[in-house]
């Protein structure tokens, strides 16, 4: 391909990728109707009730930090 043709192709590809990204982000935003909120508040949507150290580990991985438990973890979940 020649340089102007390659540049045109690159611009079209970037524009298409941007369009897909914008479409995906707009599709993720929605309003939850009052009669659908019960599905989101279902007991299975709540995290497990783990005792002690396991609960602290799950919380530290989710939050990305550890909180005074005395262990030297980074919070990234890789331990």
Image (tube, rainbow, N blue to C red):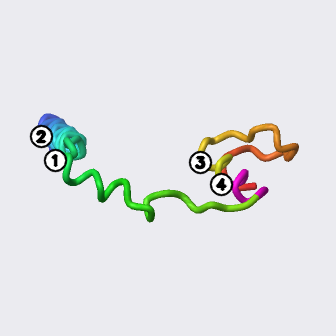
Q: Residue at x 69, y 39 (%)?
A: 65
Q: Earlier in the sequence, mark 1 or mark 4?
A: 1
Whether pointer 1 and pointer 2 mark residues with C-beta atoms closer than 8 Å, the reply is yes
Range of residues picked out in magenta: 52-57
- Whether residue 61 appears in this view of the structure is yes
Say which residue label 4 marks: 58
Find residue 79 and report its horizontal and vertical position in percent. Answer: 76, 55
Mark 2 vs 3, N-terminal side: 2
Query: Quick check: marks 1 and 4 in contact, CB under 8 Å?
Result: no
**Front disc: 1 or 4:** 4
Please name the residue that numbered disc 1 is placed on: 1
The secondary element bearing badge 3 is classed as helix
Q: Is residue 13 in view from this perspective?
A: no
Label 2: few (<14), some (14–19) or many (≥20) C-alpha neighbours in 10 Å? few
In the picture provided, is 50 more to the left or to the right than 38? Answer: right
Give the residue pinned by disc 3. 62
Neighbourhood count class around disc 4 (C-alpha, 10 Å): few under 14, some 14–19, many 20 upward:
some
Numbered label attached to residue 11: none
Question: Separation of disc 1 and disc 2 at Cα?
Answer: 6 Å
- Which element carries disc 2, helix, strand or loop? helix
Mark pair 2, 4: CA separation: 52 Å
Q: Is residue 38 above or below residue 31?
A: below
Which residue does the image show at 17% across and 36% down from the upper left?
11
Task: State the SS at label 4.
Answer: helix
Q: Are marks 3 and 1 in contact (CB under 8 Å)?
A: no
Residue named by callout 2: 5
Question: Answer yes or no: do the residues labelled 4 and 3 have beta carbons within 8 Å?
Answer: yes
Tag 2–tag 4 contact (CB < 8 Å): no
């Amino acid at each position: 391909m020649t340089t102007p043709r390659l540049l045109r192709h690159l611009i079209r590809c970037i524009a298409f990728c941007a369009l897909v990204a914008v479409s995906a982000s707009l599709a993720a935003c929605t309003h939850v109707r009052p009669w659908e909120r019960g599905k989101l508040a279902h007991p299975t949507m709540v995290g497990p009730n783990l005792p002690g150290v396991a609960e602290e580990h799950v919380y530290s991985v989710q939050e990305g930090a550890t909180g005074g438990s005395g262990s030297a973890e980074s919070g990234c979940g890789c331990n």
